[in-house]
Amino acid sequence: MSEQPIGVVGAGTMGQGIAQVLAASGFEVKLYDVADEQLGRATAAIDKGLSKLVAKAKLGEADKAAAMARLDTTTALDALRECEVIIEAAPEQPALKEKLFRDLSRLTHDAILASNTSSLSLTRLAGVCERPERVVGMHFFNPVPVLKLVEVIRAEQTSDATVARIEALTEALNKTAVPVGDSPGFAVNRLLVPMINEAAFLVQEGAATPEAIDEAMKLGAAHPMGPLALADLIGLDVCLSIMEVLQEGFGDPKYRPCPLLKRMVDAGYLGRKSGRGFHVYE
Ligand code: CAA
C-alpha cells in the first residue's frame, strides 16, 4: 500500500464512518468538508466510535490515539491534491457530485476517484471527469465500522487497474468487495429500499403499526432490525431519493414511492437524524 493519504470528501454519517475505518486501518486520512463545524462534529463522532472499540477491548488506547493522529481535517479541496485515492461521500445531489468530480479530476492526475453514491450513475459521474478510467463506485453501508460489505461499481469507463486498487483497499479495511454493475440502486438498495417502501405502504393502509412490522421482520425473517427502524437509520429522505432514482431509472410503476414516505420527508420527519421518523428518538 502506498504512503500517500486517502481523501474523504464529506464529513456526514458515511464520511465519518469511512474516515474512522481508514484511520483505524493504518491510513493517513484527509477529511474534507465545506463546513468547519461539521468537521468538528465528525472528529468527535470518530473519537466516540473508536472509544467503543477500546471499551470492547478490540482496540488499545495507544492504537486509538495513533488512529486519531492519522486523521487530518480540512475545508480546502486543494489539500486533497496529494491523495492517492479520494472517496467522495457528499450529499446525494447529482449537480453537487458532478461538480466535485470535475474539480477533483482537474486537481489530481492519477488519483483514483471513488464515489460512495448510493444510487447515482457512475458512468455519468465519470463522464464529467478528466481521465475517467480512474472513476469507480465504492459503496459502504451504514454503520460503516460494523458492516462488512463494499459494493464496487464499475462505470463504462472504469479500468481494470482502478477496480483492482479499490478491491485491495477494501480488503485492507477488513471488508469484502462485491462487484456490481452500474444499474440504478446497484444490488443492495434495489432490494432493500423497495422493502422499506412496501413497509411504509403497510403503515399508510393501517394494516400494521411500525412497531408490529419491525418486530415481525426481526422475528420472522431474522433481520437485525425491522425495515422501518432501518429507514430511520438510513434517513427517510435518502430512502425517498433512492425510490425516485429507481422509478426514473427503470420507468416501472412498481418503484412508486409511498405517499406516506413523501409526506414524512416534507414534514421533516427524517428518522434518527431529526429525532423522529417511523419511531421517535430522544
Ligand atoms: N464504531 C465502532 N463500532 C461500532 C460503531 C462505531 N461507530 N457502532 C456500533 N459499533 C459496534 C458496537 O460496539 C457493537 O460491537 P459488539 O458486537 O462487539 O458488541 C456492534 O457494532 C453492534 O452495535 P450495537 O450493539 O450498538 O447495536 P446492535 O447489536 O443492535 O446492532 C446494527 C446495530 C449494527 C445497526 C444492526 O442492527 C444492523 O446491522 N442493522 C442493519 C443495518 C443495515 O442494514 N444497514 C444498511 C443500510 S443501507 C445503506 O447503508 C446503504 C445506503 O446506501 C442507504
Image (cartoon, grey):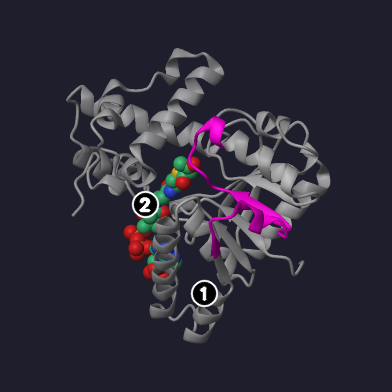
Quarter of the figure with residue 215: top left
Amino acid type, callout 1: Met
Along the line of sight, the residue nearer the viewer: 102 or 122: 102
Answer above or below: position of 245 versus 165. Answer: above
Camera-near label (2 vs 1) is: 1
Q: Residue 151, how many percent across, how many down? A: 61, 45
Query: Which residue in the structure is indicated by mark 1?
Result: 68
Answer above or below: position of 128 versus 87. Answer: above
Mark 1 vs ligand 1: CB below 8 Å: no
Residue at image coords 39%, 44%: 234
Let me know if residue 170 appears in the view.
no
Query: Which residue in the structure is indicated by mark 2?
Result: 224
Answer above or below: position of 82 versus 99. Answer: below
2 or 1: tag closer to the N-terminus: 1
Residue at image coords 50%, 24%: 246
Using the numbered discs, state the Cα–Cα distance from disc 2 to disc 1 in whole angstroms. Answer: 30 Å
Badge 1: residue crowd in 10 Å (few <14, some 14–19, many ≥20): some
Which secondary structure lies at badge 1?
helix
Mark 2 vs ligand 1: CB below 8 Å: yes
Q: Which residues are magenta?
A: 73-96
Which secondary structure lies at badge 2?
loop
Indicate left or right for 255 with 173 as reference: left
Along the line of sight, the residue nearer the viewer: 42 or 62: 42
- Report if residue 142 lies within the magenta region: no
Indicate left or right for 179 with 197 as reference: right
Let me know if residue 79 appears in the view.
yes
Location of the N terminus (image quadrant): bottom right
Q: Residue 104, how many percent across, how many down? A: 68, 45
Amino acid type, callout 2: Pro
- Report if residue 75 lies within the magenta region: yes
Q: Which quarter holds ligand 1?
A: bottom left
